[in-house]
Every structure is written in C-alpha cells, then in structure tokens.
Image: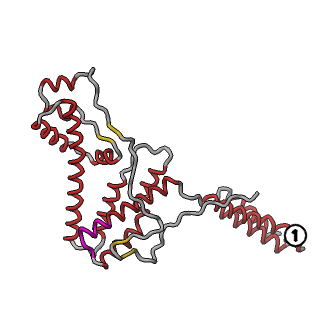
Amino acid sequence: MALLIPTSRFLRAFPSKPLGLSAYLAYLALAIFGILGSSPQLWAQNAVPAIKMQAAVRIAGAVNAQPLNDRDVTARKWVRGLIQQELNAIQSVCKLNPAQAKELLDLIETEWKSKFAAVFRSYSEANQRGGVDFEFRVETAVKNWMREVDAITEDQRSNWNFELDSRNALRRRIVIGKMVSDAEGKFGLSSKQMKEVETLLQERWKEAWWVMYRNGTTPETKFAWISTALSDAQRTAGADTSAGRQEYYTSGGSTDLPSKSLAERFQIADVQSDESIQLQTLPAAPAKPQP
C-alpha cells in the first residue's frame, strides 16, 4: 500500500499530461494496488476501472481519426490528376528512359502530399475564398522535381523549360487577346491601337489573370492601363464617370480539372512508382453505434 501513495502523488502532479500518459499511469497504479491487495475480489474491483480507462483511450483515438472531408479528397485527386498530366507531357517532350522515369516517379510519389499540404488545407477550409491555382502550383512542383533527378540530363530539362515558357506565352496571348477585344468593344480601337493596348497589357501581365480566365472570368481592362494608347475623344469617354463601367465577365467560375484516384500509382509509359512506396489510404468512417 505504501507504493500506491507516491504513485498517486505522481499522478496528481501531472494533471496536464496527455491522455495517453495519464491513462498508462492510472493503469500502472491500479495494477500495483491489485497486486498488493489481500484478495482476488480486491484485484477484480481495481482491474475493472483500468479496463474501462483503456477502452476510453481507444475511443478517444478513434474520434481523432476522422476521414478527410469531401473538398480535401477532391483537391488531392485534382493534384494527382494534374501531376499525371504533366508526366504524360514530360514523356512526350523529353523521352525519359525507364531509369529516369523510375527515379522521377519515386520522388514524386514520396513527396507529393507534403508539397501540397498547404493547397489541400486552403481548399478544404470552410471559409476559403477565391480559387486555388492548382495548375501553377503543380507545374512549379514538377519543374522542381525535374531538377532534383540526377539521371535527367540538362538537355531534357532545357526542353521541358522551353515547353513551359511556350505554354505560358500562349496563355498570355489568349487572355490578353480577350482583354484587347473587350477594350476594342468599349473604346472603338483601331488596329494600331489594339497592338499598342496589347503591348501595354503584356507589360502588366500577372499569372493570376490566367487563373481567373481558367475559372471563367476575364480580367477587367482598366482605363488607366491603356489611356496612353487612346485618342483625346476616347480618353474623355473613358474618364466619364457617368458612363457604364466595364465589369468582370464570368461564367460562374466552375472548376474542371483532371482527376486521378488516390489508390492509383503515377506512371510514365510502362513504368510505375515503386511498390514499396505506400499509397495514401483514406481513414475509414467511424462505425455507426448499434441500437
């Protein structure tokens, strides 16, 4: 019984310890008490609370293992789909051999969840506002992974960088072309002015404009940006606050991205990531209590 006293003091001295440690110490104290007890009945009386405490710990652990919410799962599938899409393009442009493909796939399969943790968190938050630029983040991550694979040659990296630059140049042409068209409709631009406005918008290009356009919105062509290309009459019309302002054009901002199962491995041609790399498995939903 003397051994139980310091044990009880020890437990009272650590009221803020995590549940797992407290439960273990409680179980230890009860076990000592049971061993020193003078009868089997006394042992049974003290063993029952310990068993209940262990069950409580298991229940608390089960509550903490909640399944991912729907938005989080959707974001992860989109990221995997975009990564696989990039891998297909890499093979088309760079012609990786099996060894190169294997090293790249293993690296991506190992790191993709940690690289995009902030993206998943941002998209799954209930108060999340605005769109998440999945495409740009995936392109940036894959570009960095390409640099980290020693087996990939400099020529292959250069070819891929050229592909990305060409892709972005085409995106700028698409978005700015729509913005110039909007300005032409509002101010009645000549062909010369349209070229000047295009140049002015090229100088102000922001990657966010493509994200807006990708989600169905055309960025506003602000008067102040293009006023130097306009005539006096056009400037007067643009400066008229009573005239109707140009608004954002939107189709609702729906997102349509490629999706890939969380249980399906990344692949380049006939090469897949190594079987030793564990794929992400979603936590099972807690079982419904029986009536």
- Say which residue appears at 28% left-offset and 36% top-offset: 220
Residue 212, position in %: x, y?
A: 33, 44
Mark 1 surroundings within 10 Å by alpha-carbon count, few (fewer than 14), some (14 through 19), many (20 or more): some
At 29% from the left and 40% from the top, the residue drawn is: 218
Quadrant in which residue 29 is drawn: bottom right
Secondary structure beneath dot 1 equals helix
**Residue drawn at the location 28% of the way across and 70% of the way down:** 91
Quarter the C terminus occupies: bottom right
Q: Is residue 93 magenta?
A: yes
Please name the predominant secondary structure of the magenta segment in the image: helix
Q: Could you say where residue 165 lies in the image, as x and y percent from the top left?
A: 21, 57
* Residue in the foreground of this view, choosing between 3 and 216: 216
Type of the residue with mark 1: Leu
Q: Which part of the image, by quadrant, shows the N terminus?
A: bottom right
Looking at this rendering, what residue extends furthest in the bottom direction? 99
Determine whether, in the image, residue 170 is placed left or right of residue 100. left
Q: Quadrant of residue 201?
A: top left
- Residues in magenta, as a range: 87-96
244 vs 137: above or below: above
Report if residue 169 lies within the magenta region.
Answer: no
Q: Residue furthest top?
A: 242
Label 1 sits on residue: 42
Residue 263 appears left or right of 252: right
Residue at figure coordinates x 42%, y 60% from the top left: 259
Instruction: Indicate the position of residue 47 as horizontal and vertical percent values.
Output: 81, 69
x and y percentages locating residue 128 in the rendered image: 46, 45
Q: In this image, 45 relative to 286: left or right?
A: right
